[in-house]
Amino acid sequence: MSQYTLDELSRLIDHTNLHAYASADDMKKLCQEAINYHFRMVAINQVQSKICYDILKDTDIDIGAAISFPLGQTTIESKVFDTKNAIENGANEIDYVINITEVKNNNFDYIKQEMEQIVNVCHQNSVLVKVIFENAYLTKDEIKHVAEIAKVVKPDFIKTSTGFGPSGAKIEDVKLMKETVGDVVSVKAAGGIRNSDDFLAMIAAGADRIGTSSGVKIIESIKQRMVDDNIQTIKIDRKYQKNLK
């Protein structure tokens, strides 16, 4: 049984706005909310990296750029270039989408090569990297196979979904991913997590990060629950102990 303070729960949240129509004012609002609630990271499209860096550079909030988002259908060379560009513009976390077509082609050597190149660029620059599977398009065997590759390559996180696919994070997928990688790689759950019950369930299943655009609502709900129950921490029964990165 793990116990979390409200701040520790906030630090599990990647505060997200990945809409194509997100404006500069939307980015300012996102960043200010991240500061107010002490979220771990703002999850934004690559092109928004610089504006978020300028706002957050003197804080402990990370800037997370999405690469080849949401389809993953760009070349390795393009993904590597975009990763480097995002880092140059202030991103210190990268969430990239795998080439799902190559998974369907059973071309797992390609998936490993792609992962190795992007992970190497990130780790050479002391940047944390997450690999987005987009599980809605994958079979359980494919999810496990890509997770096994990650266990060898060692990105910081593997991630369930973009939030733009036909479905988002599922408890059974989080468990499968975590059971496959163990303590070698962390798991991020994202997509459709909009309330505190789902948020806590994903953590219990093994997730160490939660990507959501509902972070404010979730933390306010948990805060009220703690006030109502007169408690200082939330207990979560986890098979895998928290491995915060």
Image (cartoon, rainbow, N blue to C red):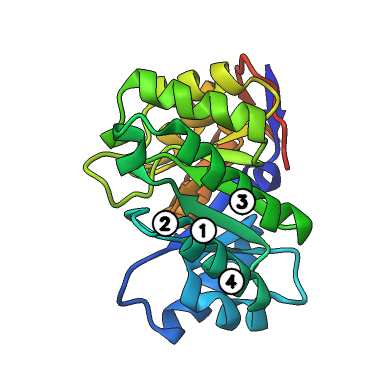
Residue visible at 74% across and 52% down in the picture: 123
Dot 3: element: helix
Disc 1 secondary structure class: strand
Under mark 4, the amino acid is Ala
Front residue of this view, candidates 244 and 37: 244
Q: Mark 3 is on which residue type?
A: Gln
Residue marked by disc 2: 213
**Numbered tag placed on residue 117 in the rendering:** 3
SS for callout 4: helix
Mark 1 vs mark 4: give the one in front: 4
Q: Amino acid at mark 1?
A: His
The amino acid at mark 2 is: Ser
Q: Earlier in the sequence, mark 3 or mark 1?
A: 1
CB contact under 8 Å: marks 2 and 3: no
- Nearest to N terminus: mark 2 or mark 3: 3
In space, the residues marked 2 and 4 are separated at their CA atoms by 21 Å
Seen from this angle, which residue lies furthest left?
Answer: 166
